[in-house]
Amino acid sequence: MKGKGDAFSCRAMLAAPAVLAFASTDACAKEGGAAMTGSRVLVAYFTRSGNTRVIAETLHRELGCGLFEIRPARPYPEDYEQHVAQATRERDSGFEPALAAKIENLADCRALYLGFPIWGETVPPPIRSFLKVHDLRGRTIRPFITHGGYGIGNAASVLESHAPAARIETPFVMEADQERRTLNQVRSWLGQLKG
């Protein structure tokens, strides 16, 4: 039986080749063990199940850059279905939650790797909040996005509308829907047992 750590290890191994290809285009790519950079780079991410964290931590290690986890001031419910219900209400109402912390000295950052999952075919509310409270004028945003099989929805237009003066590059996109699939498989199994 695999533990939580095993699941993250498997995800890390599966995601690493694709992430490294994505990361190697950055000016902060490593050469001879030393980070070469003409500007400061930061990886900021929001995650629920840990899929986006695996990518963020891989970028952080490979680029030798800063790492910042975006968290709402009031955490979402641990229960998956309650979490989805709250996120849906927030999405539908346009709610942008307060964040637990902001990035200090963002003025020094020239390139921002921004990671998040797709929720309800759009950007999660904490990402909207993050973009609203940080001045990203003149910065390059390199999105990395995970989704559950339905694509990135309107994420590109949300990024453009919430960071209009930033240069937004083509995102790295990866399907990663283990949590929902697990839930559905368990329900299917239980349904068979009841019959």
Image: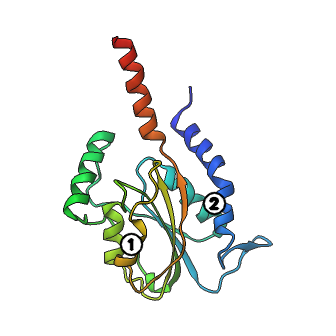
Tell me where residue 40 appears, x and y as whole percent: 57, 81
Q: Earlier in the sequence, mark 1 or mark 2?
A: 2
Nearest the eye: 32 or 131: 131
Residue at the spot 64% in from the left edge and 47% down from the top edge: 14
Residue 29 vertical position relative to residue 165 in the rendered view, above or below: above
Tell me where residue 60 appears, x and y as whole percent: 59, 65
Spatial CA span between label 1 and label 2 = 23 Å
In the image, taking residue 134 as reference, residue 86 lies left or right, namely left
In the image, taking residue 7 as reference, residue 147 lies left or right, namely left
Residue 133 vertical position relative to residue 180 in the rendered view, above or below: below
Name the kind of residue labelled 1 in the image: Ser
Label 1 sits on residue: 157
Residue 79 visible to an observer of this rendering: no
Tell me where residue 150 appears, x and y as whole percent: 44, 51
Quadrant location of residue 187? top left
Residue at the spot 36% in from the left edge and 60% down from the top edge: 122
Name the kind of residue labelled 2 in the image: Val
Label 2 sits on residue: 19
Residue at the spot 62% in from the left edge and 42% down from the top edge: 10
Disc 2 on helix, strand or loop?
A: helix
Residue 96 visible to an observer of this rendering: yes
Residue 99 vertical position relative to residue 133 in the rendered view, above or below: above
Residue 121 vertical position relative to residue 148 in the rendered view, above or below: below
Tell me where residue 130 appears, x and y as whole percent: 35, 71
Which quadrant of the rendered structure holds the N terminus? Answer: top right
Disc 1 on helix, strand or loop?
A: helix
